[in-house]
Amino acid sequence: MTSKQPSLFAVDAPPVEFHGSNYVEERDRPRLGKQFRAVYNVMSDGGWWTAEKVHKALSVLYPKMGWPVQSIDRQMRYLKDIPSCTVEKESRGKGLWVYRLVREE
């Protein structure tokens, strides 16, 4: 990591329990944990975000990660499982949804 690149852990993300039929703790938790913390950090600004917008932000911040937008979208859904967070959503029409992370301090 260079001095110009922000820390992936700029904000302490709360713990999350990953799940799914193909989820293997030892294999998947390190990668998914990094993704989740990155999504949490980007969305912690309280702004409205689409999965594509978060993906673009992370592609700039962490170009070597290569996370697909579908993975970013899934991490955004995991945010709803965090008791100290509220995820607000709003339709912008034509199937486009935006999400805002509201953290309880």
Image: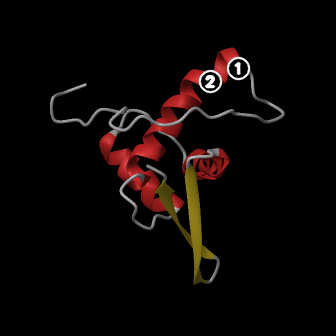
Residue furthest to the front in view is: 105
Q: Residue at x 57, y 57 (%)?
A: 86
Q: Residue at x 38, y 33 (%)?
A: 64
Task: Reply above or below: 41 against 103.
Answer: above
Kind of residue indicated by mark 2: Arg
Lateral position of residue 74 relative to residue 23, left or right: left
Kind of residue indicated by mark 1: Glu
The quadrant of the picture occupied by the N terminus is top left
User: Considering depth in this image, is 33 or 100 the residue closer to the camera?
Assistant: 100
- How many labels, in total? 2
Quadrant in which residue 75 is drawn? top right
Residue furthest to the bottom in view is: 93
Please name the residue that numbered disc 1 is placed on: 25
User: Considering depth in this image, is 21 or 45 the residue closer to the camera?
Assistant: 45
Secondary structure category for the residue under label 1: helix
Task: Reply above or below: 48 against 64.
Answer: below
Please name the residue that numbered disc 2 is placed on: 29
Crowding around mark 1 (Cα neighbors within 10 Å: few <14, some 14 to 19, many 20+) is few
User: Are the two marked residues, 2 and 1, in contact with CB atoms closer than 8 angstroms?
Assistant: yes
Q: Which mark is residue 98?
A: none
Q: CA distance from mark 2 to mark 1?
A: 5 Å
Residue 59 x, y percent position in the rendering: 38, 46
Q: Residue at x 62, y 35 (%)?
A: 16
Lateral position of residue 28 relative to residue 62, left or right: right
Residue 84 x, y percent position in the rendering: 56, 47
User: Considering depth in this image, is 88 or 38 the residue closer to the camera?
Assistant: 88
Q: Residue at x 62, y 83 (%)?
A: 94
User: Considering depth in this image, is 61 or 15 the residue closer to the camera?
Assistant: 15
